[in-house]
Image (spheres, grey):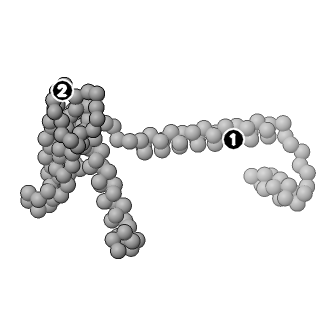
Amino acid sequence: MIAAGAALVLANRGGHLPALPGDTLVIAALIAVMVAACVLIFLYLRRNYRRAKPVADQWQALAVMGELCPYGWQAQITLYGWGAPVPDDAPPSRVPLVELEWKQFAEESGRIAVARKVWAPTIGEALQSMIEDRRTDIALEQIEQAAAEDGDIWWNE
């Protein structure tokens, strides 16, 4: 350790130290270890910040929405068959559509806090859209709360 410190002092003063034959290999090995550590950190962070897994079935959707809506929620699914008349607000589609209307209830009993409608080609995709809508609402609520705490609410003026 003292020799390394002395070498650093001599190198900083313009002195010349002869390179040892293993120095290049040691430096290359340290660079390889640092690159490997960076790759592992990147993979760890990427995996942790990945999107939540999509719901696989109605039971998982029930559990997730139960967590996302602590005061209750309600959903109604309408399936439209081939050639069935669809509402005017339905998106254009070449396949039969699934309409999912959902409501989130507020803390006060029976008061509706949020009411939304999503369209999808399958029931599973409609359930996933409902959950993504609720997660987006939560993210926006957190942003608004953080802005209110910082006093940066310029859009309410």
Q: Which is more toward the observer, 37 or 139?
A: 139
Q: Residue at x 41, y 41 (%)?
A: 50
Q: Residue at x 80, y 52 (%)?
A: 3
Q: Amino acid at mark 1?
A: Leu
Q: Which is more toward the observer, 78 or 31?
A: 78
- The tag on residue 80 is none
Q: Residue at x 57, y 39 (%)?
A: 39
Q: Which is more toward the observer, 152 or 94?
A: 94
Q: Which is more toward the observer, 113 or 95?
A: 95
Task: Decide: is 31 above or below 9.
Answer: above
Q: Secondary structure at mark 2?
A: loop
Q: Secondary structure at mark 1?
A: helix
- The tag on residue 83 is 2
Can residue 148 be seen by looking at this rendering? Answer: yes
Q: Residues within 10 Å of mark 2 (few under 14, many from 20)?
A: few
Q: Residue at x 11, y 59 (%)?
A: 111
Q: Which residue is mark 1?
A: 30
Quarter of the view holding residue 147: bottom left
Q: Amino acid at mark 2?
A: Gly
Residue 43 placement (x, y as % from top left): 50, 39
